[in-house]
Image: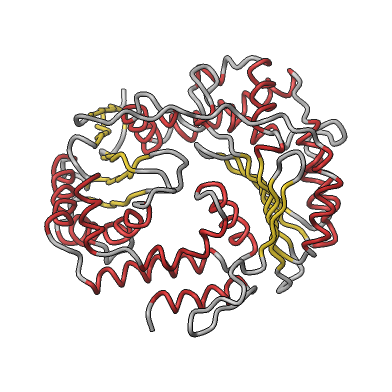
Amino acid sequence: MKPTAIFRVGLCGVLSLGCVSMAGAQTNPDFGVETHRLDNGMRIIVQEDHSIPSVALYIFYTIGSRNERPGTTGLSHFFEHMMFNGSENFGPGMFDEIMEAAGGSNNAYTSRDVTVYQDRFPPSALETVFRLEVDRIQNLSINERMVASERGVVASERRTSVEANNRSILREQLMAAAFTAHPYQWPVVGWMVDIENWTMEDLAKHFEIGYSPANATMVVVGDVDAARFIELAENSVGSISSRGLPPPVTTREPEQRGERRVVVTKPARLPLLMMGFHVPESRHADYYPLQMLETILFDGESSRMYRRIVDADQLALSVDASYGLALDPTLFRIEAMPREGVSPEAVESAIYEELNRLKDVLVADEELEKARNIRLASFYRGLKTLNGKANALGNYDVFFGDYRRLFRTPEDYSGVSAEDLRRVAREYFTQANRTVATLIPEAEE
């Protein structure tokens, strides 16, 4: 059976809604997903799934570090913390206490593009969760005492997760060197000097534009009635006035016209090597070919880079890559840790040899099929849970512009050819398009 057909049958089972015949005709192309837009602009996406008595509710705010500027870096991540620190009707810590008392749990994350809040709870807690979410969107407490306290927490997080972490600090320097104009150049956690100097005016403005209902997508998957959920949303979140949208990010990174290099010297046992190649955003047609290349080169011990650099030549302890979701053109990042006694230059040279091999020799059908199967298997695993489904629906809606792109994933992967892989390797993996960062160990004083 062709991979596309396997995926279609699997997708029905994983999403538990809608189905596809063996002939490939969809009886429900949206897999039971319903959408609604409130008058204040908030987008609602609902998928009923009554397989277990549980609900996953995700709110995607399209605001991240790309919406900041020099002087305000880190504010999006800061508000991820602040949103749990009290509002007009619920004091500090009460959000978690009430959620847990109702049998639920929550979490959140911030990226360069979005800030996402995740609630998981039994159906009986739905109205409670709405009250909590509406109150913190509408009435978040932003007072100087709480800001000072959380500012200290975020500064401490930066010291431990970045400044005391060799891999994180080198990655931060790589991004700062690779981007000269676009806001992807600064870290999500923010620069320390900015964390120490945000003003109350900065905070109020960032919250006003970032947490406007018009800038949010609410996704719910689970044991709910879609019509009832939309009614609850209308009567609760729908009462919040829209504050408009953040100013559009119009900056585009200029074409890089030559290799850039960064060297960090820091106490360490082993060196580190990182490189980044400028690549398109997620909506671009080359997203899926680049995903396939990442799998062929770096996914698992049978990947090309692992077999060559870690296993056969024993040049490095690890080698991997990252090319994730992005609203704007981003980086395809490669990271490696050379073995003791091996120079970063030797590892770098071997990586280039493998990248160049992709440009010269077409990937065999068997290897292409293997990469496609790995990608699809990973995709299935991500959709096995209510959380995975909610996160996927939200990500596709925000990053691809339409949640229905989720259901085209089999065609998108199946449509990638060996020639596509060679073309994108030749286009993006070039010397002029790369930035290389190296951490060189220095002796402790």
In the rendered image, residue 308, in percent from the top left (x then y), is placed at: 18, 59
| Quarter of the view holding residue 378 | bottom left
Q: Up-down: is 183 above or below 58?
A: above
Residue found 54% across the figure and 83% down from its top? 21
* Camera-nearest residue between 272 and 326: 326
Counting the numbered discs, the total is: 0
Q: Is 35 left, or right, of 304 in this rendering?
A: right
In the rendered image, residue 72, in percent from the top left (x then y), is placed at: 55, 20
* Camera-nearest residue between 92 and 71: 71
Q: Quadrant of the C terminus?
A: top left
| Quarter of the view holding residue 144 | top right
Q: Is 360 left, or right, of 406 in this rendering?
A: left
Residue found 69% across the figure and 61% down from its top? 34
Q: Quadrant of the N terminus?
A: bottom left
Residue found 69% across the figure and 56% down from its top? 35
The colour scheme applied to this rendered structure is secondary structure
Residue found 43% across the figure and 32% down from its top? 184
In the rendered image, residue 138, in percent from the top left (x then y), is placed at: 79, 33
* Camera-nearest residue between 136 and 310: 136
Q: Is 360 left, or right, of 189 in this rendering?
A: left
Q: Up-down: is 184 above or below 426?
A: above
Q: Is 278 left, or right, of 364 in this rendering?
A: right
| Quarter of the view holding residue 87 | top right
Q: Up-down: is 227 above or below 146?
A: below
In the rendered image, residue 410, in percent from the top left (x then y), is placed at: 44, 68
